[in-house]
Image (spheres, helix red, strand yellow):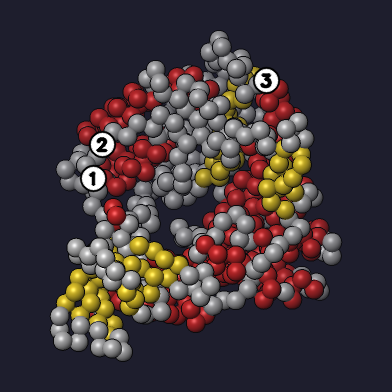
């Protein structure tokens, strides 16, 4: 397959500004970590963002250096707001990206700049993935320049000579920040071992060397974000970038060729930029608000209610992955189905803004959307002040569900109210908070908090029948549920994350959450005891 290379439009590393090292406050489970072992990342399609920090930058590769002979290089104009680097399946794709997608992205950023929205870091960095299956030795120079192999070797030496594990991790994090998403999956694993006294920088360097050898070996391939795009803001907030992948489905175009997808990801950059410019931003956010806002920014700009064209066998649009002009249920009800939020949960916000487009002058609507975005940050900051809002959770699904719901409800409610408060003559849609955001479930919130194992702990609670229930916790894990009978007999029901204990059961009708434990050696009827979000013990 013929591939085309797009060289940097502007200095690629301008978005990484130095700042003091800050330990990441991850939400990962705090179980004891296994011994550090090599985990080769043959394909770098890694998930969520990772805490990264910046150190002094190495010398940049020469953007004018010739590409490998089999990869024709093409220079492109410099743009102050956006830089891009990557690989394309064909020369025609590269040309379409340059002619259609980049001008749209530039206009999108300028459009929302009029409402005061700005990027968290400039320029916006776009990385286009090589096609799936591309050998790493071909892909890496396309993305990071011809000197990337020497830079990887130099990183190994720097890590080995680091003064501490944390210093070694910071150096790898800085490297990954400059060349995303290289080594991101490795960093996620490495964070679990940062404080392990049995592991030192030399061990980290050894595993890094093995990781690189595997990646650059004869079977190593490198691509990312297949069938999708992703805006990344690492936990330390000191750099950001957007990853754009290749489609493997005949029903959609490559994400890097979908203008609304690219603008959606840049929309994430804008709402994060707004939040970071006005105060601290916690780690636990709202999926419903984030995804709805990104779509709103993209489609208020382009005027098209169809997000993500679904293609026919002939390659012509015949449907949409999401629409801006319809919704079926409130945020609260949409959350209730699965106990979590996704791209669809905030659909009522999309339709709200689409309705307002017909009734509000464009400049006023832009200002209202910007005010709504600001209101989300204030709501999330208030939630972070609530009891147990930021403790690590893994087994305690009662507490986790409680705060997932609170964040989704309150963040979307804040956006709704912020938008409508900005409009002097509020349209009829602004009177539909109850229909669009839904039931706040205040009583359930209180019961969830009171009956969460994390809240109960070893202090325990006494039930009406005289039994006392307590929980032994280790970080984010429930080690055991302890039940003391009225006669003083103590029963232990151990947790085991490897076996999925406690087992989660959720009743989407009532909202009841049950955590099921097994009695030691029990395998028959009555051998499982469940603790519910209603403060009940159940047997099955």
Left or right of 375 in this view: 353? right
Residue 139 position in % (x across, y down) = 50, 23
The vertical placement of 487 against 422, above or below, is below
Q: Which residue is painted at 55% across and 31% down in the image?
A: 129
Q: State the residue at coordinates (36%, 40%).
A: 187
Q: How far, Cα to Cα, is label 2 from label 1?
A: 8 Å
**Left or right, 241 with reference to 292:** left
**Is 374 drawn above or below residue 456 in the view shown?**
above
Up/down of 302 relative to 488, above or below: above
Earlier in the chain: of badge 2 and badge 3, it is 2
Q: Are marks 3 and 1 in contact (CB under 8 Å)?
A: no
Q: Which label sits in the foreground, 3 or 1?
A: 1
* Quadrant (top left/top right/bottom left/bottom right) for the N terminus: top right
- For this rendering, which residue is in front, 512 or 262? 512
Residue 346, by quadrant, is bottom right
Q: Specify the farthest residue to the top.
A: 69
Mark 1: few, some, or many residues within 10 Å (few <14, many ≥20)? few
Instruction: State yes or no: discs 2 and 1 in contact (Cβ < 8 Å).
Output: yes
- Judge by depth and name the residue closer to the eye, 197 or 31: 31
Name the residue beneath numbered marker 3. 91
How far is mark 2 from mark 3, CA to CA?
41 Å
Find residue 101 and report its horizontal and vertical position in percent.
Answer: 71, 35
Relative horizontal placement of residue 251, taking residue 467 as reference (left or right): right
- The crowding category of the residue bearing disc 2, from other C-alpha atoms within 10 Å (few below 14, some 14 to 19, many at least 20), is some
In what quadrant of the picture does the C terminus appear?
bottom left
Answer whether labels 2 and 3 touch (C-beta < 8 Å): no
Vertical position of residue 91 compared to residue 535: above or below = above
On the question of residue 451 being in view, the answer is: yes
In-image side of 400 versus 167 (left or right): right
- What mark, if any, has residue 37 been given in the picture? 2
Q: Which residue is mark 1?
A: 34
């Amino acid at each position: 397959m013929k591939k085309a290379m797009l060289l940097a439009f502007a200095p690629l590393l301008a978005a990484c500004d130095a700042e003091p090292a800050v330990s990441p406050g991850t939400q990962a489970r705090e179980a004891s970590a296994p011994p550090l072992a090599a985990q080769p990342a043959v394909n770098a399609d890694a998930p969520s963002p990772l805490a990264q920090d910046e150190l002094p930058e190495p010398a940049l590769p020469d953007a004018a250096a010739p590409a490998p002979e089999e990869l024709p290089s093409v220079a492109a104009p410099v743009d102050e707001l956006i830089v891009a680097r990557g690989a394309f399946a064909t020369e025609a794709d590269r040309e379409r990206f340059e002619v259609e997608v980049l001008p749209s992205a530039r206009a999108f950023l300028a459009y929302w700049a009029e409402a005061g929205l700005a990027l968290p870091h400039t320029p916006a960095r776009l990385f286009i993935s090589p096609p799936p299956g591309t050998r790493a030795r071909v892909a890496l120079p396309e993305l990071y320049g011809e000197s990337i192999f020497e830079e990887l070797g130099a990183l190994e030496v720097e890590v080995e000579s680091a003064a501490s594990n944390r210093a070694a991790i910071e150096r790898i994090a800085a490297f990954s920040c400059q060349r995303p998403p290289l080594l991101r999956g490795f960093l996620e694993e490495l964070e679990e071992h940062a404080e392990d006294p049995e592991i030192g920088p030399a061990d980290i360097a050894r595993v890094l060397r093995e990781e690189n050898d595997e990646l650059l070996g004869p079977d190593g391939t490198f691509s990312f974000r297949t069938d999708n795009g992703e805006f990344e803001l690492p936990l330390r907030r000191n750099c950001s970038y957007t990853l754009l992948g290749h489609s493997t489905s005949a029903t959609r175009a490559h994400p890097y060729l979908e203008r609304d997808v690219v603008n959606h990801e840049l929309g994430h950059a804008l709402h994060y930029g707004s939040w970071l410019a006005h105060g601290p931003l916690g780690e636990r956010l709202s999926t419903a608000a984030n995804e709805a806002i990104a779509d709103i920014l993209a489609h208020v700009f382009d005027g098209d209610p169809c997000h993500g064209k679904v293609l026919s066998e002939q390659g012509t649009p015949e449907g949409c992955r999401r629409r801006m002009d319809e919704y079926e249920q409130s945020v609260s009800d949409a959350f209730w189905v699965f106990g979590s939020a996704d791209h669809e949960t905030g659909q009522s916000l999309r339709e709200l803004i689409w309705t307002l487009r017909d009734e509000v002058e464009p400049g006023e609507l832009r200002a209202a959307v910007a005010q709504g975005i600001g209101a989300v940050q204030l709501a999330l900051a208030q939630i972070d002040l609530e009891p147990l809002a930021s403790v690590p959770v893994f087994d305690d699904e009662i507490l986790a569900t409680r705060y997932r719901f609170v964040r989704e409800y309150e963040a979307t409610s804040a956006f709704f109210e912020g938008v409508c408060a900005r409009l002097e003559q509020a349209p009829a849609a602004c009177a539909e908070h109850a229909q669009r955001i839904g039931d706040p479930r205040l009583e359930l919130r209180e019961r969830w908090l009171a009956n969460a194992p994390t809240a109960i702990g070893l202090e325990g609670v006494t039930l009406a029948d005289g039994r006392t229930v307590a929980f032994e916790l280790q970080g984010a894990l429930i080690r055991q549920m302890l039940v003391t009978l009225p006669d003083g007999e103590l029963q232990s029901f151990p947790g085991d994350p490897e076996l999925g204990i406690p087992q989660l059961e959720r009743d989407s009708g009532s909202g009841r959450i049950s955590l099921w434990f097994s009695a030691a050696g029990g395998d028959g009827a009555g051998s499982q005891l469940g603790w519910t979000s209603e403060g009940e013990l159940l047997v099955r």
